[in-house]
């Protein structure tokens, strides 16, 4: 049945055929007119019905569709080189072909037409499917094989693997993420020992190294629910994080084995590892739970236990104003932030020091709350006690996200 061939289709096909087209390119001029057939079948039917001649080589595509199986074989070889549960085919088409197609549509109209790139994607995908034996996924493919039809070369775009968990930071000498050397900005110099880094390692590297090896990937990116200072520990249940592993060749990760491998480190450890979705990166960065800290505070003068306890109680559910601390003013906007001290209690008192357990709103600078930072934080613990105070050690003991 060819009742789909109306006057509009006939006119467009006759005009297109004058250029000397193959069945694919002729059929594509009326791709939306008939259903249940390929463009090649559509083109053959048009040629038969209207007495049009098909050409070889095609003046539009140069008979590129003769190489579909070759493209499919290249796609299969590339896709099968990595682990994935699904795939999708894309392609790059010679710009001259695309331009010739646009010129044709100026004459025939494009209301019923389909771009050559769409047809090639579909036909290569159909030919590759039985070779790959994985599902085709259009919305969120784990692997996209992009064929350059000029050279039959394939470039793989592999979706990252995301692993979520909670980390413990056990060293006061490493940052959360890789910190490029300030002098050379990561290039390597005498100051950093040619490493390009300010610190020999980081939480990111302690986790990312083994994780990257597990998926045979190329690079890792670390996303944490906030961060602690370099000289602070992260204890308790740990801080939530997602590590993003780019260009993985493997996706089936033994998370128990990975956790054991990471936890060989004396600097950082993990727990509760699981495969995560990309959307969790934004969620984890947007989260602002309160934090619970343990701080050892040094006092210039003799500590009065009763007075310290009295001040601690007075800071329950108290708001403080913090101007950007002087220690980070070179990289943070100079502004005043209002934060809440939810609770504070004294755990231990010595002659010139005491230990505080305090819960604060996300974003509170605890060291500056204790010292006052030269009046940039008010009220402060130093101000309330009437004695200069500084934090000797600081531990994050809970991220209150659950």
Image: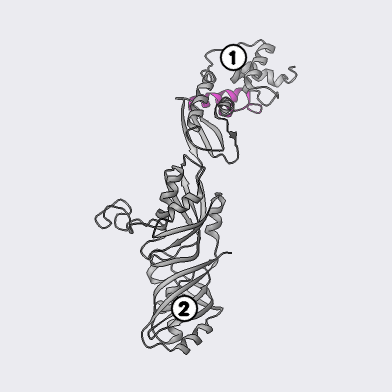
Residue 31, above or below 321: above
Of 9 and 91, nearer the camera is 91
- Residue 4 quadrant: top right
The residue nearer to you, when weighing 209 against 123, is 209
Residue that label 1 marks: 18
Q: Residue at x 58, y 26 (%)?
A: 130
| Residue drawn at (38%, 88%) of the image | 302
Lower position in the chain sequence, tag 1 or tag 2: 1
Helix, strand or loop for the magenta stretch, by majority: helix
Camera-side residue of 323 and 385: 385
Q: Which residues are magenta?
A: 94-119
- Circle 2 residue: 356
At numbered mark 1, what does the secondary structure look like: helix, strand or loop? loop
Residue depth check, mark 1 versus mark 2: number of the one nearer the observer: 2
Q: Is residue 47 above or below residue 385?
A: above
Spot occupied by residue 259 in the image (x, y as percentages of width and height): 47, 53
Q: Quadrant of the C terminus?
A: bottom right
Q: Is residue 108 magenta?
A: yes
**In the image, residue 275 lies at what x, y percent?**
54, 49
Percent coordinates x, y for residue 397 in the rendering: 49, 69
Give the left or right position of residue 32, taking residue 283 as reference: right
Identify the element where label 2 is drawn: strand
Q: Residue at x 29, y 57 (%)?
A: 183
* Depicted 308 relative to depicted 186: above or below: below
**Does the magenta run of residues contain 259?**
no
| Left or right: 7 as drawn, with respect to 253 | right
Residue 38 picture quarter: top right
Q: How many marks?
A: 2
Q: Nearer the viewer, residue 369 or 131?
A: 131
């Amino acid at each position: 049945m060819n009742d789909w061939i109306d006057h509009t289709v006939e006119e467009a096909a006759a005009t297109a055929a004058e250029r000397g087209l193959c069945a694919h390119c002729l059929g594509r001029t009326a791709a939306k007119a008939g259903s249940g057939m390929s463009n090649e079948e559509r083109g053959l039917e048009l040629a038969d019905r209207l007495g049009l001649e098909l050409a070889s080589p095609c003046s539009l595509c140069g008979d590129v569709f003769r190489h579909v199986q070759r493209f499919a074989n290249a796609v299969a070889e590339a896709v099968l080189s990595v682990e994935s549960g699904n795939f999708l085919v894309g392609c790059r088409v010679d710009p001259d072909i695309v331009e010739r197609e646009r010129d044709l549509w100026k004459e025939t109209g494009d209301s019923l037409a389909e771009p050559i790139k769409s047809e090639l994607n579909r036909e290569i995908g159909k030919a590759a499917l039985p070779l790959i034996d994985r599902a085709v996924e259009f919305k969120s493919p784990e692997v996209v094989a992009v064929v350059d039809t000029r050279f039959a070369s394939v470039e793989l775009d592999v979706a990252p693997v995301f692993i979520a968990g909670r980390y413990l930071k056990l060293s006061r000498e490493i940052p959360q993420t890789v910190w490029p050397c300030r002098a050379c900005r990561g290039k390597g110099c005498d100051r950093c020992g040619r490493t390009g880094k300010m610190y020999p390692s980081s939480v990111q590297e302690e986790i990312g190294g083994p994780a990257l090896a597990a998926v045979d990937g190329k690079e890792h990116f670390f996303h944490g629910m906030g961060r602690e200072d370099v000289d602070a520990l992260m204890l308790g249940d740990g801080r939530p994080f997602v590590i993003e592993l780019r260009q993985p060749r493997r996706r089936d990760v033994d998370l128990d084995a990975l956790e054991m491998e990471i936890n060989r480190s004396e600097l950082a450890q993990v727990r509760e590892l699981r495969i995560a979705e990309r959307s969790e990166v934004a969620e984890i960065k947007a989260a602002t739970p309160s934090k619970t800290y343990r701080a050892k505070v040094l006092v210039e003068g003799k500590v009065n236990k009763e007075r310290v306890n009295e001040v601690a109680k007075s800071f329950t559910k108290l708001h403080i104003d913090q101007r950007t601390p002087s220690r980070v003013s070179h990289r943070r906007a100079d502004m005043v932030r209002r934060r809440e001290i939810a609770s504070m209690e004294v755990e231990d008192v010595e002659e010139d020091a005491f230990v505080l357990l305090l819960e604060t709103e996300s974003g509170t600078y605890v060291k500056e709350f204790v010292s006052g930072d030269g009046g940039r934080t008010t009220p402060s613990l130093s101000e309330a006690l009437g004695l200069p105070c500084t934090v000797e050690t600081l531990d994050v003991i809970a991220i209150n996200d659950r």
